Amino acid sequence: MLTLVLSLSVCLCGASIAIADDEKPAETGFEGWDSEKPAEAGAAKSEEKPAEKPAEKPKAPEVGAGANAPGSHPNIVPSVSTQYGALTILGVFQTLFDNNIILKNAPTDTHYTKMSFDFQRARIILKGHLVSENLTYFFQGDARNMLSFALDMFVGYKFADSGLSFRVGRFVPEFGYMMPRNTADLAAINYPLYITNARFAVWRQIGIEAMYQKDALQLRLGVFNGLLYDQLNINPSDVYMQMGTVTIGATDYTNYSDNNKMKDFLLRVSYKPSKELSLDFSGWFGFPVNFNDADSNDFVFMGGPGFEYNNGKMHLIGEVMFRAIKYGEDNADPGSVTSLGAWLHGGYRLTDVIEGILRLDLSDPVIGKDRNDMLMRVTTGAHFWLEEKHFRILTNLFVDIPVEGENRQIPMGIQVQFAALW
């Protein structure tokens, strides 16, 4: 059986009004907007042609942990400053047009399954610093997140020039490359397949993450409430996207607090031998409460190595991730579950405007038990950087290939994404 899925996604993203710190306490207002000064007595007011703003230079590519975080792109709107701190306002707006076509064995079986506009994201981001640049804050909300609006909220502190900093609150931990990044900086339109198909994402967590930077070495340690691993009943994205209590079936899941004393732990090690290359290891150690025995905890490990290289013309990134879930002993113990995910992405700037990309994905949610779940994906396309990060058009073609199984279906999709950051 052959299945062809054609999908067209249209995405509008926005970002940034910034409020920068002003070293002169007496001067406040909008940085970059000079108020008109009255002409001196007897002096003729001259009419000068305003100087033309020089073209924006592309920002040097970021790689590795912390790269392309939400709100990290350069702002284009004049900023406001006061002696008390700074504020940056950004927006991300995305709309998806989805067109799916299913082609079955016989030509007469061709039919359309979907053609619609889908509202994806309407996000507002507030970030900046208070009193000094060492004390920072971040908030992100999404109008599509109807239950709570709030997504991320945390404060951070940097200990001067010691290389030590931390953040505490609700945010996406630095596990893997793509989940912590701005949704407009995923290197392709979609997340890598292992995040969604094999459920390797840690989603948004409440906790604390500390970072130590020493020359080329970066170490991150985190402690969080952790994920739930009742795989038979819940999808983690259903619980951790919303901020509050989510009812699934007859069970309430509360994600702004924890249901047991044990916590989950993050370990992230990054080494950058050059500004273009980052070598990384991500590790997640989870101890969720067992759903059938409140006195015991399950054990979860997720992690693996990865690398990212970006010199502004060529972009290479890849990861290999492994997960093992050991359920606590109880009458309904399903035994251990092991999963595997891997992906490799390559992009090349053919010109200053056009980038060609190719991505290979592999995910196996349950190794060795159900081969029907093992999936490979090939993604290719062209990205048009019309105004660098401020306006891009991304076109992707992907093909999903199940490794085994009867009556295999091979979905195909064509996506076009418009992304504008302000």
Image (cartoon, rainbow, N blue to C red):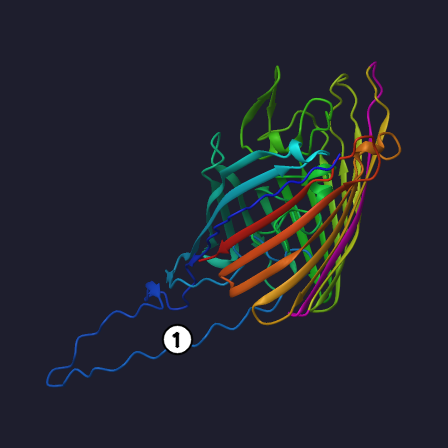
Residue drawn at the location 64% of the way across and 39% of the way down: 203
**Element at label 1:** loop
Amino acid at pointer 1 = Lys
Q: Is residue 323 magenta?
A: yes
Q: Can residue 62 be seen?
A: no
Does the magenta run of residues contain 41? no
| Percent of width and height locating residue 197 | 72, 37
Q: Quadrant of residue 193?
A: top right
- Where 193 falls versus 34 (above or below)? above
- Please give left or right for residue 151 compared with residue 411 in the image: left
Residue 415 image position (x, y, % from top left): 59, 48
Say which quarter of the image contains residue 55. Answer: bottom left
Q: As displayed, is residue 23 above or below residue 299?
A: below
Residue lying at the far left in this picture: please name it.
Answer: 42
- Would residue 54 be seen by someone viewing this image from the given angle? yes
- Relative placement, left or right, of 334 versus 315 is right
Q: What quarter of the picture does the C terminus occupy?
A: bottom left
> Residue 349: x and y, percent?
64, 68
- Taking the spot 38% from the left edge, 64% from the top edge, the residue there is 78
Residue under label 1 = 53
> In percent of the image, x 82 and y 25: which residue is there?
327
Say left or right for 79 vs 94: left
Q: Main secondary structure of the magenta part?
A: strand
Q: Position of residue 6 (x, y in %)?
A: 61, 43
Q: Which residues are magenta?
A: 311-331
Question: Label 1 neighbourhood size at 10 Å, few (<14), some (14-19), many (20+)?
Answer: few
Q: Quadrant of the N terminus?
A: top right
